[in-house]
Amino acid sequence: MNWIYWAKLYDSKFQAGVLAKRMEEDWWIYGYECPQEVEVYKSKKGRFGVRYNT
């Protein structure tokens, strides 16, 4: 399983969670394939990001 990482990191888990939920629900608007799994992760520097796999 290969993860695809969203380019931007966020200061709060809430901000990353909002993006993750939009990716799950609105994937067809942005023109990418329906993600099988979307996950919020914490980077080594303490910021939050979103990763997904298709």
Image (cartoon, rainbow, N blue to C red):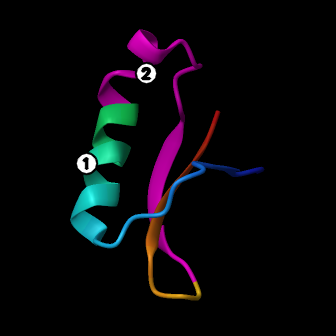
**Residues packed near mark 1 inside 10 Å, few (<14), some (14 to 19) or many (20 plus):** few
Seen in the image, is 46 located left or right of residue 14?
right
Q: Residue at x 47, y 47 (%)?
A: 38
Give the quarter of the figure containing the C terminus. Answer: top right
The residue at the far right in this view is 2
User: How far across and down, in percent of the image, does residue 37 sit?
Assistant: 51, 44
Q: Identify the residue under disc 2.
A: 27
**Residues packed near mark 2 inside 10 Å, few (<14), some (14 to 19) or many (20 plus):** some
Measured along the vertical axis of the image, is residue 42 above or below residue 44?
Answer: above
Does the magenta run of residues contain 19? no
User: How far across and down, in percent of the image, does residue 18 sit?
Assistant: 25, 48
In the image, which residues are magenta? 24-43
The residue at the far bottom in this view is 45
Label disc, if present, on residue 9 of the rendered structure: none
Helix, strand or loop status at disc 2: helix
Type of amino acid at the residue the image marks with label 2: Trp
Label disc, if present, on residue 18 of the rendered structure: 1
Q: Residue at x 59, y 87 (%)?
A: 44
Q: Residue at x 28, y 71 (%)?
A: 12
Mark 2 and mark 1 in contact (Cβ < 8 Å)? Answer: no
Depth check, front residue: 52 or 10:
10
Q: Residue at x 27, y 58 (%)?
A: 15
Helix, strand or loop status at disc 1: helix
Does the magenta run of residues contain 33? yes
What's the distance in space between the residues labelled 1 and 2, CA to CA? 13 Å
Seen in the image, is 47 located left or right of residue 52?
left
In which quadrant of the rendered view does residue 23 lie?
Answer: top left
User: How far across and down, in percent of the image, does residue 2 sit?
Assistant: 77, 50
Type of amino acid at the residue the image marks with label 1: Val
Depth check, front residue: 32 or 2:
32
